Amino acid sequence: MKKELDPHFLAGMPLPIGAMLQIDKVVEIDEDKIVCQQKISKDHWIFPLHFPGDPIFPGSLLIEAAAQVVAIWGWNTGLRGRFRLVKCTAEFTVPILPTDGVITYSASAKKRRNVCFGTIQISVGKEVVGTVTANVVVITN
């Protein structure tokens, strides 16, 4: 089932706004998998800051994006509340550069009660550049 990130699909979902929203598009989503994308360019707000003269996309924002992917998957399963990243591990093997264009997040996910567990492969083109495991809890009160 293909759903794009739009107000009808994510209406009321408590995702970050503005520059902190890392996901531009939901490419595919089903009962145990989700694929999302994020567009980047040399004009992205982070590159002049991280690092001047040697810009790379920061791992902390890749982790944030991975958590957002898991939260979107959890929302799609019917969970409602505030999503919070409570545990993660990350490994990055190749830096993401301003010229890379699109970052793809491909996750396998499952849930137990109000906790979503995801393993997210991060890729640019056909190259896997990192992996994040993210546990996201949904707070309902």
Image: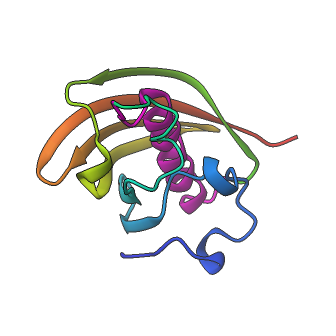
The residue at the point 39 percent across, 43 percent down is: 109
* Magenta stretch, main secondary structure class: helix
- Tell me, yes or no, whether the highlighted magenta stretch contains residue 116: no
The residue at the point 43 percent across, 42 percent down is: 110
First to last magenta residue range: 54-79
**Quarter-of-image position of residue 123:** top left
Horizontal relation, residue 104 to residue 75: left or right? left
Location of the N terminus by quadrant is bottom left
User: Where residue 84 sits in the image (x, y, percent)?
Assistant: 67, 34
The residue at the point 29 percent across, 58 percent down is: 101
**Front-most of 22 and 105?**
22
User: Where residue 82 sits in the image (x, y, percent)?
Assistant: 75, 44
The residue at the point 16 percent across, 54 percent down is: 125
Location of the C terminus by quadrant is top right
**Quarter-of-image position of residue 119:** top left
Horizontal relation, residue 83 to residue 63: left or right? right
In the depicted structure, whether residue 111 falls above or below residue 14? above
User: Where residue 85 sits in the image (x, y, percent)?
Assistant: 60, 30
**Quarter-of-image position of residue 14:** bottom right
